[in-house]
Image: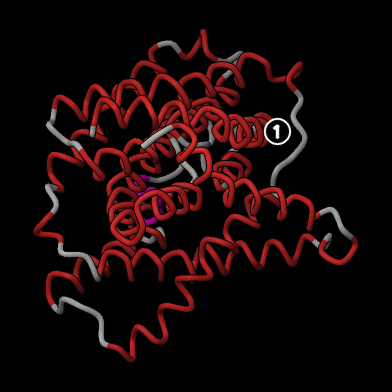
Amino acid sequence: MGFSEIGLALVPVAALLAFGFGLKRTPLFSNQDFWTGAERLAYFVLLPTLLFRNVATVDLTQISIGPLAAALVLPTLAVSLLLIAAHRATAPDARAFTSVFQGSIRFNTYIGLSVAATLFGESGAALAAIVGAILVPVVNIASALVFEYFLVDKHSWLALLRSVVLNPLVLGCAAGVAWSLVAGGMPELASGVLDPLAAAALPIGLLCVGAGLRPISIGAHGRGLAVSSAVKLVVLPAVTVVSLRLFGITGEPAMVGLVFQSIATASSAYVMSRQLGGNAPLMAAIIALQTLASLVLLPPVLAIGFRLLA
C-alpha cells in the first residue's frame, strides 16, 4: 500500500469535513441547535448501530483479540504515564494539561472507521469496530482519571464507572460481541433495518466534526498544541508500531490499529473539557489543528507502518 493510495483514501474524509465546516457557516445551517441534534443522533444512535452491525457480523474466533488488545493498550498507557510524569513541562497549569492529555491519547472514531473502511473494505470496518471496542474504554477512563487527579472538582468513582459502562460506543460494541458469540450472522430483516442506519453514521458524523472545527489561536496555546500534536500524530504511532511488532500483529489488524493510534483526537474531548473544568479553548484548538495535520501526516505514517507490519 503506497503513499498515494493512502492519500486518496483520505480524500472523502477531508471532503466531508470541509463540507461540514462550510455548511455550518451558511445561513441555512448556522443554527447550533441543528448541529447539536445531529451530533446526538450520530453519537447515541447511528454510530452504536454501526459498531454493533460490524462486530456482530464478524467471526471473532478468527482474530487474536488478546494480543491485539495488549499491543494497542500498552502504548496508550505508556504514553499516558510519561505525560503525567512530565505534566509540568507539557502545560502551564492543570487545566491546560487535561486538554493536552486528551489530545495526546484520544482518537476520532468517525475518522478511524472511515479510513479503515476505505482502505480495507468490510473487513477493515469490522476490525475498526473491534479496535474501537478495545481502545474507547481505555482512553475514556484514562482521561477521566486525569481530570479526577489534577482538578479540584472531584467526581465519584461510581459516576466514572457509570460513564464508561454506559458509553454508547462501548454498549454498541459489547452488544455486537454478544450477538456474534451467541447468534452469529444477522437475519435479513434485521439487516434491512440496521444497514441504512449504519450507513448514515459516518457521513453525518464527519459533517458534524467539520462543523465543530474552530479557529486556531497558535500564539495563545502554542506549547499545548505542539506537545499534544507531536505525541498523538508521531510519538504514539511510533510506539504502537514497535508494540505491534513485538506482539506479532501484522496485516490488516495491525494497520487498522495503527490508523486509530495515528488520527486526530476526538471532538467529544471538547465536551468533556468544558463539563469537567478543563481548558476548553485549548481543547478546541487541539482538535482543529490535529484534524488538519492528521490529513497530511497520516499517509506517510501508514505507508511506513505498512512496510513494517505487512
Seen from this angle, which residue lies furthest bottom? Answer: 189
Give above or below for 306 relative to 211.
Answer: above
- Compare residues 273 and 29 and report the one nearer the observer: 29
Residue 60 in the image, given as x and y percentages of width and height: 15, 60
Q: Main secondary structure of the magenta part?
A: helix
Residue at 59 percent of width and 17 percent of height: 226
Residue at 65 percent of width and 56 percent of height: 208
Give above or below for 171 relative to 235.
Answer: below
Q: Quadrant of the N terminus?
A: top left
Residue 88 in the image, given as x and y percentages of width and height: 51, 10
Seen from this angle, which residue lies furthest right? Answer: 27
Which portion, as a residue range, is magenta? 157-163
Magenta span has 125?
Answer: no
Residue 15 in the image, given as x and y percentages of width and height: 65, 50
Instruction: Using a 10 Å C-alpha cutoff, classify the residue at mark 1 as few (fewer than 14 neighbours), some (14 to 19) or many (20 or more).
Output: some
Q: How is the image coloured?
A: secondary structure
- Compare residues 28 and 192 and report the one nearer the observer: 192
Q: Quadrant of the C terminus?
A: top left
Q: Is residue 11 left or right of residue 87?
A: right
Residue 167 in the image, given as x and y percentages of width and height: 40, 58
Residue at 15 percent of width and 48 percent of height: 65
Amino acid type at circle 1 is: Pro
Q: Which residue is mark 1?
A: 281
